[in-house]
Amino acid sequence: MKNKSICFVAPEAYPLLAKTKHHSVGGAEVQQVLIAKELKKYGFDVSFVVGSYATKLIENVDGIRIIKSSSRYSGGKLNYLLTLFALFIALRKANADVYFLRSPKHLLGVIGFYCRFKKRKFIFSSSIDYDSNLKHIRETESNISRILFFYGIKQADAVVAQSNHQRRQFEMNFGLNSILIKNMQPLTFSIPSKELPPVALWVGTAYERKRPHLFLELAKTIPFSRFRMVVAPGRGKKLNEAIEEHAKEISNLEYLGFIPYHKINEQYARASILINTSRWEGFPNTFLQAWANKTPAVSLEIDPDEVICKNKLGFHSSTFDKMVKDIKLLLKNENLRREMGENARKYVEREHDIKKVAQQYAELFQNLQGKRWT
């Protein structure tokens, strides 16, 4: 058997790989970088195709080959075609046995075509629930993006789901038998140092679907408690500026702006609860990072496979008024916070430990490769 090589197609992953400053860090990129670093320990050759803000056409960081795609989609049909052409060239440079895509899904078509043409294996991994939501794709994606998505997902040799809900959606909407592999989380063994008075933390990118303005409303509604906000501007510059300006007017809210992934763990360790106000998610990395630090979550709408409720990892509030009550209860009740925090840590150790999940990915890649080489 020749060397086992895997290429992760992740346009926004370069800042995580090179630890450079950038506008945001997404959960999809975090997971791919974590997977890649673990797979290197299994002897895989790993490469990444990233966006145009990489500093060199090809570079090596910690044993991972990084290939720059020279164009970056900035709107318009011509730019879209140039982006896809540049991606095709980068895929050829990677020359991998297996290609892996988690986000963005509009690249599915060109990667699927490349892998079919070159007889390589292709894995698509869902990063958010609406990846498997047929109605959402039909209503929100452009015609060309929708066509490429439907074509590309049919070319995938394996589709990975983050939750049983996503698995059911893929089967119902696309007739696909996807594989459940949960998100992974590194585990440290230091004891989190919680601040007093307790802090309610929000971490996310300035996207409308994350609804950061609701966190501001929570802070105003509970004025005698402490709130802290970590916001990556992403491409929502106007929304980010509006959130920052509004935050200055709220005396019990501390706005920290963007903190790189490799420095963010301290915030989860110091916080007493994590707040999630999103409308759409997959399985939030923020949940796992908080729970690994014994920090329970209070979530407005997101509770993948109802793990929060089933395992008592915090509260799934469902309504804003109920969320206010849940936050007040947790901030006041130290014993309940501690109990839910312990549950959260045990849950991550049991279901999302990085070594256990990496083993599942290693087996998936090896099985795909074996089908071609034996």
Image (cartoon, rainbow, N blue to C red):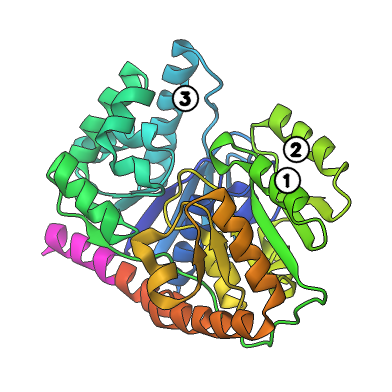
Can the viewer see residue 331?
A: yes
Name the front one of labels 1 and 3: 1
Please report whichever mark, 2 or 3, sits nearer to the chain's N-terminal start.
3
Please report whichever mark, 1 or 3, sits nearer to the chain's N-terminal start.
3
Which residue is more in the foreground, 291 or 352?
Answer: 291
Above or below, 80 relative to 200:
above
Name the front one of labels 2 and 1: 1
Q: Is the C terminus in the top left, top right, bottom left or bottom right quadrant?
A: bottom left
Specify the amino acid type for callout 2.
Ile
- Distance, label 1 to label 3, CA atoms, is 37 Å
Q: Which residue is mark 2?
A: 243
- Distance, label 2 to label 1, CA atoms, is 8 Å
Q: Residue at x 39, y 69 (%)?
A: 307
> Left of 167 or right of it: where is 219?
right
Q: Which residue is mark 3?
A: 83
Please report whichever mark, 2 or 1, sits nearer to the chain's N-terminal start.
1
Q: Residue at x 52, y 60 (%)?
A: 285
**Where residue 146 sits in the image (x, y, percent)?**
30, 25
Q: Is the N terminus in the top left, top right, bottom left or bottom right quadrant?
A: bottom left
Q: Which residues are magenta?
A: 363-374
| Magenta-colored stretch includes residue 48 | no
Element assignment for label 2: helix
Above or below, 128 relative to 305:
above
Q: Are marks 2 and 1 in contact (CB under 8 Å)?
A: yes
Task: Indicate which disc residue 238 carries.
Answer: none
Q: Which residue is mark 1?
A: 216
Can the viewer see residue 43?
A: no
Label 3: few (<14), some or many (≥20) within 10 Å?
A: many
Above or below, 303 relative to 236:
below
Which residue is more in the foreground, 100 or 250?
Answer: 250
